[in-house]
Amino acid sequence: MIQDRRAARGFTLGLILSAVVGLPIGTVHAAGPNDGSRQNTELAGNAAPRSEAAEAWDAVKDTTNPALLDAFVKRYPNTFFAVIAMARLAELREAAAAKTSPFATVPSAGPIPTSPIPLGPPPIATDGTRSRAVLYDEDPSNPTGRQFAGSVRWRTEPVKAEGRADDVVAQADVDIPSRGLRMTMSFKRNLDPSLPASHVIDLNFQWPSDTDGGGIANVPGILMKSNEQARGTPLAGLAVKVTGGLFLVGLSNVAADRERNLKLLLDRAWFDIPMVYANQRRGILAIEKGEPGEQVIKTAFTAWGQSSAAAQPGANMTDGNSGNAGK
């Protein structure tokens, strides 16, 4: 039964990734002028003709006119380039908006929010094996929203895989008692060659049936930041809703994205998970690594043989960089 569920979830993510992107993630990266040469190398001469959306994106990707980006999203809504365009729109709107609310630039569905959030409430007392977690909920009567303190327990779990050696999964169990929220984040490397992702993150939310907001309708993605009040940087990838409170995030398998994601995951101290509730209000679940989380993440990446990649030269990433999920 467990194997059937894992296979179904892998198929769901692969299907949605293929449907939204149109091609495997590794073939539609739009990072910069050297992208073409890298694609030629990775595809080994099997590159397909460029799509109309790709040609149109080349024409508007450097614009600072929100109207042009909005028109592009409406013209090509179901392409990976539309995700990039929406994130660029968020950057432009964020630059023009007053920084009065942590939710000011979070749309009901679309780009990941990158605004810094106010200092949270005091952490819940723990036995030293847990780290902090804070839920920030949008409140129309309060521009800084409502804050709920919680905790997170980090751990590694062995995973048995049929036909290959056992693997390890990094997990974070989050508890926000005053909101009745529990969430388990499971982080694993992707071993399915048919799935165009380097790693897969499961987000499994558990809420009371009468929870305020009506449950979670959308999780745009995941951000990493160096401290609680810093501006987050999105991980390159795609988030999809499987069912109920279960979401899967597939991280981009493009070489440059893999390196960038790995540096963020190993170097940054906090996760930010933006959420859109069923009533269209928004929230942000901030999760601290702390010493337990740092150890768990490093243990997992070491077991996967990927911990050394973070030391390789890469793009200069500082908090405040509003990169987007497809960039």
Image (cartoon, rainbow, N blue to C red):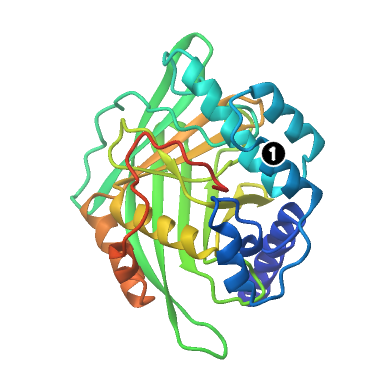
> Is 196 or 216 nearer to us in this picture?
196
Q: For the point 76% across and 46% down, which residue is it?
A: 53
Question: Residue 92 falls in which quadrant of the image?
Answer: top right
316 to the left or right of 235: left
Residue 74 appearing in the image:
yes
**SS assignment at label 1:** helix
Vertically, is 69 above or below 327? Answer: above
Q: Residue at x 29, y 53 (%)?
A: 267
* Residue farthest to the left, as pictured: 128
Q: Which residue is outermost to the bottom?
A: 163
Residue at image coords 78%, 32%: 74
Q: Please, is residue 108 above or below residue 249 in the view? A: above
Name which residue type carries label 1: Ala
Q: Name the residue under label 1.
A: 59
Where residue 64 appears, as percent x and y from the top left, is 58, 25
* Image quarter of residue 115: top left
Quick check: 102 above or below 262?
Answer: above
Query: Where does the image place residue 84, in percent across and percent down from the top left?
Result: 61, 41
Q: Out of 68 and 225, give the one closest to the viewer.
A: 68
The percent position of residue 248, horizontal first and vertical second, equals 59, 55
How many callouts does the rendering have?
1
Residue 73 coordinates in the image, percent (x, y): 73, 34
Horizontal side of 146 relative to 66 (left or right) equals: left
For the N terminus, the quadrant is: bottom right
Q: Residue 105, can we see it? A: no
Q: Along the horizontal axis of the image, is 46 left or right of 187? A: right
Residue situated in front as seen by the camera: 150 or 106: 106
Position of residue 34 relative to residue 303, above or below, is above
